[in-house]
Amino acid sequence: MNKIISKDFLSELVFRMVIEAPRIAQSRQPGNFIILRVDEHGERIPLTIADANPEAGTITLIVQIVGCSTRKLSRLEAGDFLSDLVGPLGKATHIEKSGTILCAGGGVGIAPLYPIVEGHKKAGNRVVVVLAARTKDLLILEQEMRQQADEVIVMTDDGSYGSRGLVTQGMEQVIQREKVHEAVVIGPAVMMKFASMLTRKYNIPTVASLNTIMVDGTGMCGACRCTVEGKTKFVCVDGPEFDAHSVDFDEMLRRLGAYKEEEVKAYEAYLEQLQR
Amino acid sequence: MESSQEYLASERAQTWREDLRKSVKAADRTKKERVKMPEQDPDVRNKNSLEVNLGISEAQAIAEAQRCLDCVTPTCITGCPVNINIPKFIKKIESGDFAGAAKVLKETNALPAVCGRVCPQEVQCESQCFYVQKMNKPAVAIGNLERFAADFERESGQISVPEVAPRKGIKVGVVGSGPSGLAAAGDLIKMGYDVTVFEALHEIGGVLKYGIPEFRLPNVMVDVEIENLRQMGVVFEPNFIVGKTASLDTLRAEGYKAFFIGSGAGLPNFMHIPGENAIGIFSSNEYLTRVNLMGASRPGYDTPVLKGRNVAVIGGGNTAMDSVRTAKRLGAERAMIVYRRSLDEMPARKEEIHHAMEEGVEFLCLHNPLEYLSDDKGRVCRMKVQQMDLGEPDASGRRRPVPREGSEFLLDVDTVIVSIGVSPNPLISQAVPGLEVTRWGTLVVNPDTMQTSIPDLFAGGDIVRGGATVILAMGDGRKAAAGMDAWLKEQNI
């Protein structure tokens, strides 16, 4: 049982939760994730750790409401308890001093990007961040990123904030301007696919963090498997970060839709239940 | 110690045992037929998740116990990996002292209700029974009697908590709460250590919970045994991954003097054939975990599982049988075993194969998948299979399957469950530098003490064996507990 310390909404569908988890707050590293269950009948949901406070013994999660389980989670308040929380899971981000790092985050993918930006800054790298959102109201963590990064470029699909355009346009602008030694891309699978196509064109080593379907998160089930360089890998123990140029994003996209029908049905039933 | 000749002889010489032996003539005992385990009707049980075996009655148990000759040399015990005093518990049943029988079981076995259900007794204790060895008759139904005694105790509500030694004030950790970990924890707490069991999942029980289905081992049986350990003083920490949540060094600094590692054989194997990552293709671990641990298909639970109409399970082990019978229960029209050798080579227990056949599972023996094809949404829709012939025996002693040229054909499937074995979970070896592993990734241990290359770490179960049975894992856990106890005493800890 883990106590929720605070909860606030960053946008209509994205909320931030600070949760008591003293051991994880101590041992987590950038790139790690946790798995939680909201209640006794809940699914195991994998979520990347956005931040942690070892002194206070808390971790921060940033979650987008996409279905039944995340909606249930969003309804918990400070003082409530999660049924289960386990972690930190996955391999930590490989961070070393290498020069200029281009970090691109799309949508709620900006949250897992945050500790990576922080880590690269600590290692002494120059970090340029490109944040992308559909519209201004959906942009998260801009101020936090500005405090860490050397530069933050904001892109919105509708031009309501920052520059109008896709994440790749913001990235290309940086690549054409200065030497980029490494890129990190985190966001929806489609965004990562196109962002990594761009960096491949410029021969920039690129890391993507994959958010596949998982059950146990410890290598036991293989629900999260993906193809990297023609070989099957388990995102939970071999990842979640991989060489973006070797990931089969099309397969990943298909596999993410495995339970689409069930998910929609469950969400509709849950929303109906809430209205009753 | 418990199994030493003198101890067994002195136990056997007790008056109540002698009187009991005299009460029925041996010739009359051997004339009795082995009692048959009552079962749910196949056409009913393949639509529900209730237990297949219903358990024997008190009268049946006493009748079966009377078959046991209480041999001078009880060879059955040599077939038991945890050295249960088999004649003693059976004679307790014969005398009508069912609770006493359960007590005997718990002297050496932390999980009798589990073992009575899932142990392959036919190749262990029962294979060494006098009836089999010398008389060419069916063995005394030791497994059914074990289950009976454990069930009687549970249903009576008067569960005996085994005695534990006075606390030594020494902390030890157990990594993993599957059968080996629970067995180790049970012995260590009896010896007087402060035992904490760390479990990665949210439920205690390991494979007993996520792997073995309700119809073979109801979760409540496992919970009762866990509660028993809790009452003896074992502390359980779910949602705790040793090496991740906290490192071994952190735990050592917190006062843990030694650890037993029973983290199991976590990683499911795949065949790495084209199309294997299509939607609808699972490992048996994923499929069974969704259904058994996460409650998929039960009302009120959030975790989904794809229910197939045409389900193929690849493999011929007990896990394959569990998977295919689960698929049948979830409503599959065709639930098929696809296995590359013949029925004779199948590693699953005969009882499980028999039950699966009764329930309407189809067996495509001497068939091997080559490739999976999927529809426009990425869901598997067909598999290409090849027929096989049996050639010469291979290293395992089983006849090697040889592909039959030109025999390939397409089979309609919408769900495939790959059940071809597991590899050891790498989390521990990744987290502990210097831990010696074999080239298969299993941990290297001293076979007498179960000590690893790092002195304060002991290990057993599938992380050492690479994939075995519940009872062998439990035997390892007991041996490791003894090894750890001896080592701690040597260190003057």
Image (tube, grey):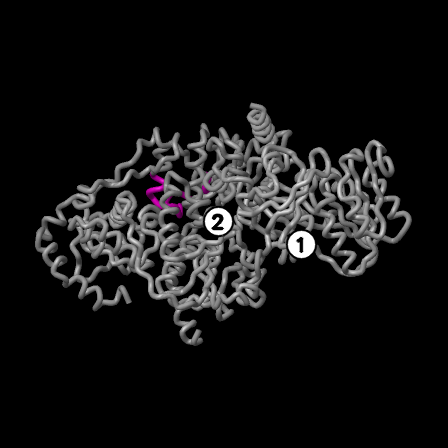
Q: Position of residue B214 (x, y in %)?
A: 39, 39
Residue B408 at least partly seen:
no
Above-or-below relation of B33 to B455 = above
Q: Say what amino acid the circle numbered 2 marks.
A: Gly
- Circle 1 SS class: strand
Residue A155: which quarter of the image?
top right
Q: Position of residue A76 (x, y in %)?
A: 59, 38
Q: Chain of mark 2?
A: B
Question: In front: B45, or A1?
Answer: A1
Question: Residue visible at 41% across and 76% down?
Answer: B490
Above-or-below relation of A247 to B130 = above
Q: Position of residue A166 (x, y in %)?
A: 82, 37
**Residue stretch rendered in magenta on the structure:** B338-354
- Circle 2 SS class: loop
Question: In front: A71, or A153?
Answer: A71
Question: Residue visible at 59% across and 35% down?
Answer: A72
Q: Say what amino acid the circle numbered 1 marks.
A: Asn
User: Within 10 Å of the Cα at label 2, are there few (<14), some (14-19), or many (20+) other Cα atoms?
Assistant: many
Q: Is residue B340 magenta?
A: yes
Q: Chain of mark 1?
A: A
In space, the residues marked 2 and 1 are separated at their CA atoms by: 41 Å
Q: Which residue is mark 1?
A: A53
The C terminus of chain A lies in quadrant: top right
Hey, which residue is sitting farthest right in the picture?
Answer: A177
Question: Residue visible at 14% across and 63% down?
Answer: B13
Q: Is residue B221 magenta?
A: no
Q: Which residue is mark 2?
A: B421
Question: Residue visible at 58% across and 57% down?
Answer: B244
Residue B174 at least partly seen:
yes
Q: Are marks 2 and 1 in contact (CB under 8 Å)?
A: no
